[in-house]
Structure formats: C-alpha cells, structure tokens
Image (spheres, rainbow, N blue to C red):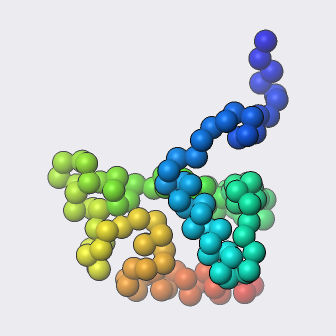
C-alpha cells in the first residue's frame, strides 16, 4: 500500500546525481571553500533550492542551474540548424550556465552582477 503523504528523501530513493549535476555540486563546494573557507554538504546545497528566504523563481533558477537543466550550450549541438546556439555570440566561446554567469564578456553579465550586488546589500 502506498502512502502519498510520506516524504521520501533522495537517500531513501537512491537516485544517483546526473554527471553534470555532480560536477556542479563539486564546483559549488570548491568555490565555497575558496570564498568562505567552508564547504557545504550536498544536502545543504540541495536544501538551498527549497529555502523560503528566496522567491520561488530564485529557488527554481538555483535548482535548474545546479541540475544543468537550462537549454544552453551542448543542448543545441545535436539539433539540426541550431548548433550555432551552443556558442556565445559575443565571445564565440562554448556556453553553459557557469560561462554565462561568470565568464562571458557581454555587458549584460556585468550589469546583472552589479544589480545583484545592489539588491544583496539591501
């Protein structure tokens, strides 16, 4: 008999992380270690995607970015006539979420981070 009201955690389901998600988790832990001298656990990182201090859209963004769920970069390479979407039109570099957020030379990236810093300061 199933009990739909029971919560089952990731550990109980034994669902393995997707390779890209695992790489993103490792990157998050390494960057946190470099920045804060502490590395969050995998459970703590996933808990962030449910934290009520963030809006639903922000939590969804964090989850999708960590899962590599956005349709950027490699996603487009296997679709006929859309392969050009896999590279940045500004820098001509292969795109992924980390590249778009952290490395791209486009003015919109620096504007986004400037605004994010202003909001965070409030």
Does residue 49 appear to the left or right of 5 in the view shown? left
Q: Residue at 26% x, 75% y: name it.
A: 92
Count of residue discs = 0
**For the view shown, which residue lies furthest in the left direction?**
81
Q: Residue at 36% x, 67% y: name it.
A: 95
At which x and y percent is residue 78? 25, 48
Looking at the rendered image, the quarter that the N terminus falls into is top right
Looking at the rendered image, the quarter that the C terminus falls into is bottom right
Q: Residue at 74% x, 60% y: name it.
A: 41
Does residue 19 appear to the left or right of 8 in the view shown? left
Q: Is residue 54 above or below residue 71?
A: below
- Which image quarter: residue 37? bottom right
At which x and y percent is residue 5? 82, 28
Q: Residue at 73% x, 81% y: name it.
A: 36
- Which image quarter: residue 120? bottom right
Is there any visible trace of residue 57 in the rendered image? Answer: no
Does residue 54 appear to the left or right of 92 in the view shown? right
- Which image quarter: residue 42? bottom right
Q: Is residue 86 above or below residue 88?
A: above
At which x and y percent is residue 26? 59, 63
Q: Is residue 8 above or below residue 19?
A: above
Name the one closer to the observer, 11 or 69: 11
Is there any visible trace of residue 80 in the rendered image? Answer: yes
At which x and y percent is residue 6? 82, 29
């Amino acid at each position: 008999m199933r009990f739909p009201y029971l919560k089952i955690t990731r550990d109980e389901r034994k669902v393995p992380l997707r390779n890209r998600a695992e790489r993103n988790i490792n990157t998050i832990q390494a960057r946190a270690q470099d920045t804060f001298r502490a590395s969050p656990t995998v459970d703590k990182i996933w808990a962030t995607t449910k934290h009520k201090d963030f809006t639903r859209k922000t939590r969804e963004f964090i989850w999708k970015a960590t899962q590599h769920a956005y349709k950027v970069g490699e996603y487009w390479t296997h679709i006929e006539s859309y392969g050009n979407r896999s590279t940045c039109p500004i820098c001509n570099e292969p795109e992924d979420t980390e590249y778009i957020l952290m490395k791209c030379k486009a003015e919109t990236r620096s504007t986004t981070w400037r605004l994010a810093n202003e909001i965070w300061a409030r």
